[in-house]
Image (cartoon, rainbow, N blue to C red):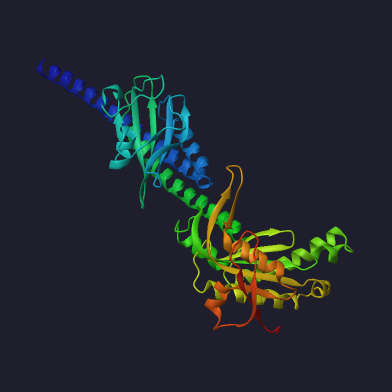
Amino acid sequence: MGADRAACVAGMLGYIASKEYEKKILATDSLEKEKYEEINFLYDISGKIASCLGVKEVTKLVLDEAIKPIEATSASVMLLNEEIETVEIIAAWGKEYRQKILMRSGEWIAGHVLLEGKAEIVNDVLSDSRYIQQGENLIHSLICAPLTTQSGTIGVINISSTNPVDYTAQDLKLLTALASQAAEAIENALLHENKLREERIKSNLERYLSPQVVQAAISEKGAISLNPTKRNIVVLFSDIRNFTSKCEELAPEEIVMYLNEYFTQMVSAIFSHQGTVNKFVGDMIVAMFGAPYPLVDQEKRAIAAAIDMQRRITTIAVPWIRDNFATGIGISAGEVVVGNIGSPQHLDYTAIGDEVNIASRLQSMAKGGQILCSQSVYHVTKDIFEFKKLGTVTVKGRKKSVETYEVLYHNC
């Protein structure tokens, strides 16, 4: 009888043990399966992210993928804008988030996560003092993970639900892993976009400034202001004598072709001496030395550029230009207002002031091949170049007459 009981108990214990073992095997298999699915999920996303270049493209992909394994009614990616010290939504999914929401680091739950650099689950958002309602829908549950790179935390990714959800440590782990991959991709995309923006700015600036000045302007990162301000600069006016009559015998396309060749050579001469091309008015060129970037020896550079311009005309490969284009140049220096001037619809970076009028007047007086300058330019460069004093001239709108000097040079 005792032996039978012992056998029965042993059988029951064996049965229980086998069931526990089966549960353990099933749990292990389940964990292994979850781990495999997680690895496969992240691997799949890494391949998709690698093909994205733009920030908006990357962030949209990240949100699309994040809401697949994690229950949510809304989601967003917020990036730190260091210039204005705020965090702003770059991509959003669902109806809770609005694209224009801005906050400072440390504000709200997302701002706190950004500041601390540590992911959080908040399954009872309404009881969290950091929560600020935006819009009509109340958020009940939230997961927020920082977007952290080697350079620091650049933003956060939010997954939320208007319905009560018990987000788990596994959800947090998955979102954190996704955020880690996303952060590197977003940082690379930002660098790529900044590079493209810099190239566009550089390309536009190089139409007006010498390459050396452009490079200096970009490397200074904001040291140059285009707002109107008083500044001492040198202004150069150049114009072809009797241009209209010279071109009457030519077809329009020929005139354009000759002008383009002429401007190419003249702009190259101005740029080689660190000048800025302000504008073209017909066949006239207006250039500045000392704006928007300060120049040492700007009067010297302006005269050297003028001499270079005159010499290049005599060596241009097009015979018609050499025979028919004779340029008069006027140069003056002093304080003017320089910067972006115009209406809200259209602005020009230009100079306004007495010295601009003087340079224009001297240019109109100069004969073909002549370079005329004011006393302000002569005074600084008299020991560098040869000059001939021509006397005084009266400038329209100016009471005082202007001492005028001709720059003497030899065509080489």
Which quadrant of the view contains residue 164?
Answer: top left
| 174 relative to 387 in the view: left or right | left
262 vs 331, nearest the viewer:
331
Q: Residue 106, image x and y in percent? A: 30, 38
In the rendered view, tell whether residue 202 sits above or below residue 364. above
The image quarter containing residue 5 is top left
Return the residue nearer the eye: 113 or 400: 400
Q: Residue furthest front?
A: 399
Residue lying farthest to the top in this orientation: 1
Residue at the spot 88% in from the left edge and 63% down from the top edge: 250
State how many labels appear: 0
Q: Report the residue at 43% width, 30% height from top.
A: 75
**Residue 358 visible in rendering:** yes
Going by the image, does 216 lie left or right of 366? left
The answer to whether 312 is drawn above or below residue 155 in the figure is below
Q: Give how far across and how far down residue 197 sits, in percent.
A: 54, 52
Q: Is residue 132 above or below residue 249?
A: above
Q: Quadrant of the N terminus?
A: top left
Q: Most extreme residue toward the right, as rendered?
A: 249
The quadrant in which residue 21 appears is top left
Report if residue 196 is visible in the image: no
Residue 388 location, x and y as percent? 64, 82
* Front-most of residues 354 and 408: 354
The residue lying at 30 percent from left, 41 percent from top is: 115
Q: Among all residues in the image, which is located at the extreme left?
A: 2
